[in-house]
Amino acid sequence: MKKCKVIVFPGSNCDADCFHVMDSVFKLDVEYAWHKDMSLGTCDFIILPGGFSYGDYLRCGSIARFSPIMNDVIDYAKKGKPIIGICNGFQILLEVGLLPGAMLRNKTLQFICKSVFLKTENCSTMFTNAIPRNAILSVPIAHGEGNYYCDNETMKELQEEERIIFKYCSEDGTVSDESNPNGSLEAIAGICNTQGNVLGMMPHPERVSEGILGSDNGAMIFQSIINTLS
């Protein structure tokens, strides 16, 4: 049985949701890992959940990056283990340097909580191989700082290496300013690292991973990871 670890920071609030999906939906061996733990122990993949680690003081994720557990997360990333950071987890991955770029305040300067549409730009990654080509996903967002930004050189690398994984779009798949909820550069909703084993995404797939919630679109992302591990 594949084993998953869900990292918990002071202020995490989606850790239980991620645990539930791994445990009850996918029937995996899942455990929490506290931010002060020195080691993750043995696991096959890692989830950094959403929330407000350390109250989002200074910048989102900027304090969590110094948590002792992050040293082992970095080591696991170097070993090629799948790591997914969701919302605040994405922000932490940016702060610790496992992903390039930074998060700015939403263009509206307001917290946004609603369902959005996502276009999968690369369906051949360990996070997207279970998503049908041309499928438009409906996944909720809930953030105040989801406006992704990077310099021109980094953007060129992301585009050329097909590391932009998800973009915000309309229901018919059109990418435009109107369908971009937070002003994110190039409508980016999710990116991966050069090695392809670390994904950061602002939308919350764990909130739409079973039919009782009205949609199981998000389950395809987790199923992709499981397919890779199998």
Image (tube, helix red, strand yellow):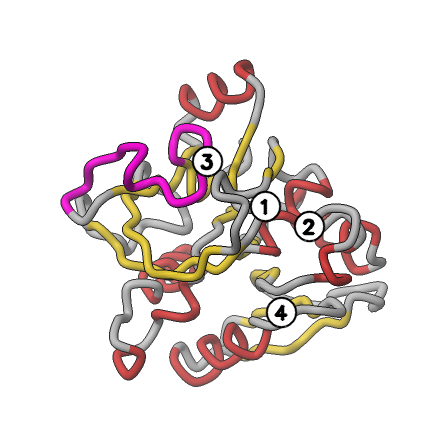
C-alpha separation, residue under disc 4 versus residue under disc 1: 15 Å
| Residue span colored magenta | 172-187
The mark that comes first in sequence, 4 or 3, is: 4
Query: How far across and how far down the image is residue 225, in percent?
Result: 43, 58
The mark that comes first in sequence, 2 or 4, is: 4
Quarter containing the C terminus: bottom left
Tell me the residue at 72%/56% (across/down).
56
- Circles 2, 3 touching at the beta carbon (< 8 Å): no
Q: Residues within 10 Å of mark 1 (few under 14, many from 20)?
A: few
Query: How far across and how far down the image is residue 136, in percent?
Result: 21, 50
The mark that comes first in sequence, 3 or 1, is: 1
Query: How far across and how far down the image is residue 82, in percent?
Result: 54, 53
The mark that comes first in sequence, 2 or 3, is: 2
Write down the residue under mark 3.
184
Write down the residue under mark 2.
60
Residue 123 appears left or right of 31 = left
Amino acid at the residue labelled 4: Lys
Circle 3: element type: loop
Residue 205 seen anywhere in this rendered image of the structure: yes
Write down the residue under mark 4.
5
Residue 193 appears left or right of 71 = left
Q: Magenta span: helix, strand or loop, mainly?
A: loop
